[in-house]
Image (cartoon, helix red, strand yellow):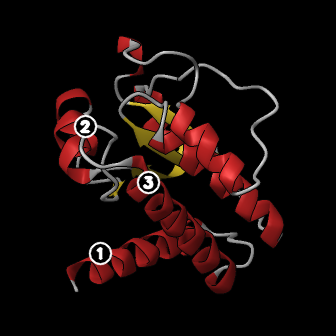
Amino acid sequence: MGDILFICTGNYYRSRLAEILFNHYAKQEGLSLRAYSKGLEAFIKRNTGPISPHTLAYLDALNIPWPEVVREPVQLKQEDFGGYRALIFMDEAEHRPMVTHYFPEYTDKVHYWQVQDVQFRDPDDVLPELARKVSELVNDLCSHYPQPSSETGFISAITENIDQVKHYQQK
């Protein structure tokens, strides 16, 4: 079983950045958790190349190394819903309808953030916001559950983090 799965539409831009940042921050903090990423519609292959140039440029700006192997986007599958301790979709407004369409039994059993895609918001706004959310998630996991050993503790930490972000966004 994996730890966290970040999901966006094409597994090209947002979810890839979230995966890389989470793994970088978790390693820095000594957190023994690992993130992965996939796309709801990676099979459509609407993007050029394996990963967004915006994502790579942002990693460069943060002096965070790229993955050793820059893989192609990966399609989300039914079995992924039971294969990770937490699934976080990047944008509720965009992804909830897709989850309902492709995987209706999981619509209300996953977590949603509010990080819009490049066609809706400028990457210069989106990427720092996403980095903040990932950093807050790692910090919360470290402070509340240094080594989350139970499923309940892990899911509580994820849920608490997402609830805090929702509260912040409503202000």
What's the residue at 53%, 23% (across, down)? 74
Mark 3 / mark 1, whichever is N-terminal: 3
For the question of whether residue 16 can be seen, the reply is no
Q: Marks 3 and 2: in contact by CB < 8 Å?
A: no
Looking at the picture, how far across and down is residue 170, in whole percent?
21, 80
Q: Quadrant of the N terminus?
A: top right
Which residue does the numbered mark 3 point to in the structure image?
A: 124
In the image, 123: left or right of 169? right
For the question of whether residue 64 can be seen, the reply is yes
* 83 versus 47 height, above or below: below
Q: Nearer the viewer, residue 89 or 85?
A: 89
Please tell me the numbered disc located at residue 166: 1
Whole-angstrom CA distance, mark 1 to mark 2, is 20 Å
Q: Quadrant of the C terminus?
A: bottom left
Name which residue type carries label 1.
Lys
Which residue does the numbered mark 2 point to in the structure image?
A: 99
Looking at the picture, how far across and down is residue 68, in whole percent?
82, 31
SS class, disc 2: helix
The crowd level at tag 3 (other Cα within 10 Å; few <14, some 14-19, many 20+) is few
The crowd level at tag 1 (other Cα within 10 Å; few <14, some 14-19, many 20+) is some
Among the 4 quarters of the image, the one containing residue 41: top left
* 105 versus 92 height, above or below: above
Name which residue type carries label 3.
Asp
Whole-angstrom CA distance, mark 3 to mark 1, is 21 Å
